[in-house]
Image: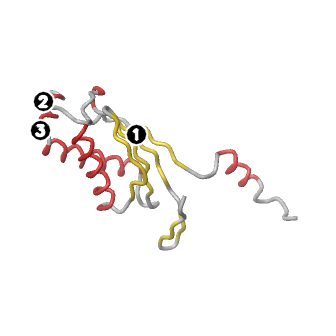
């Protein structure tokens, strides 16, 4: 994981985010999946965070995002889901019919932080901060 520098801070922040198609419909196939990947990468660039890894499954999306401390998880998810849904519905109007004219994405999502250090390593590091150096 690359350590980056901001104005007055140093950081390495990555999130694994997963969200599903409403009703788990298997609509993310072929050209729809390809277009979705393009949209997600372009959207991240526009909003100044980075898609490190991305996979579109027929009924859900996995994305690994690196972001600055100013990017909050809910905002990243809102941006990615909102813009992608709008663009997919415009390019593929048949999606709206498949989803009964409703929303593309389920409103919930999964997120976990990603680190090169395990939780145990970080706890041990913190606990040993006051230990005398040998």
- At 54% across and 58% down in the image, what residue appears? 1
Closer-to-camera residue (67/59): 59
Where does the image place residue 111, in percent across and percent down from the top left? 45, 42
Q: Position of residue 69 (x, y in %)?
A: 46, 60
Instruction: Give the answer, above or below, for where 65 lies relative to 28.
Output: below
Mark 2: few, some, or many residues within 10 Å (few <14, many ≥20)?
Answer: few
Side of 69 where 132 appears, left or right = right
Residue occupying image coordinates x 54% and y 64%? 3
Say which residue label 2 marks.
Answer: 97
Q: CA distance from mark 3 to mark 2?
A: 7 Å
**Which secondary structure, mark 1?**
strand
Local SS, label 2: helix
What residue appears at the point 67 percent right and 51 percent down from the top-left corner? 122
Residue at the disc numbered 1: 18
Asked whether 109 or 129 is in front, the reply is 109
Distance in Å between CA atoms under marks 1 and 2: 24 Å
Comparing 131 with 48, the one in front is 48
Q: Residues within 10 Å of mark 1 (few under 14, many from 20)?
A: some
Q: Residue 35, image x and y in percent? A: 23, 47
Residue occupying the point 42% across, 52% down: 65
Location of mark 3 (residue): 93
Q: Is residue 57 left or right of residue 14?
A: left
Q: Residues within 10 Å of mark 3 (few under 14, many from 20)?
A: few
Instruction: Tell me if label 1 and label 3 are in contact, CB under 8 Å.
Output: no
Is the residue under label 2 in contact with that under label 3 (CB below 8 Å)?
Answer: yes
């Amino acid at each position: 994981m690359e350590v980056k520098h901001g104005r007055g801070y140093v950081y390495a922040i990555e999130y694994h985010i997963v969200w599903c198609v409403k009703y788990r419909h298997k609509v993310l196939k072929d050209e729809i999946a390809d277009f979705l990947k393009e949209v997600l990468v372009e959207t991240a660039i526009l909003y100044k965070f980075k898609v490190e890894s991305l996979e579109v499954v027929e009924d859900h999306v996995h994305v690994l995002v690196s972001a600055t401390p100013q990017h909050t998880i809910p905002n990243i998810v809102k941006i990615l889901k909102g813009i992608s849904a709008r663009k997919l519905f415009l390019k593929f109007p048949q999606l709206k019919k498949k989803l009964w004219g409703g929303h593309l994405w389920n409103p919930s999502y999964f997120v976990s932080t990603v680190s090169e250090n395990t939780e145990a390593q970080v706890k041990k590091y913190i606990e040993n901060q006051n230990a005398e150096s040998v």
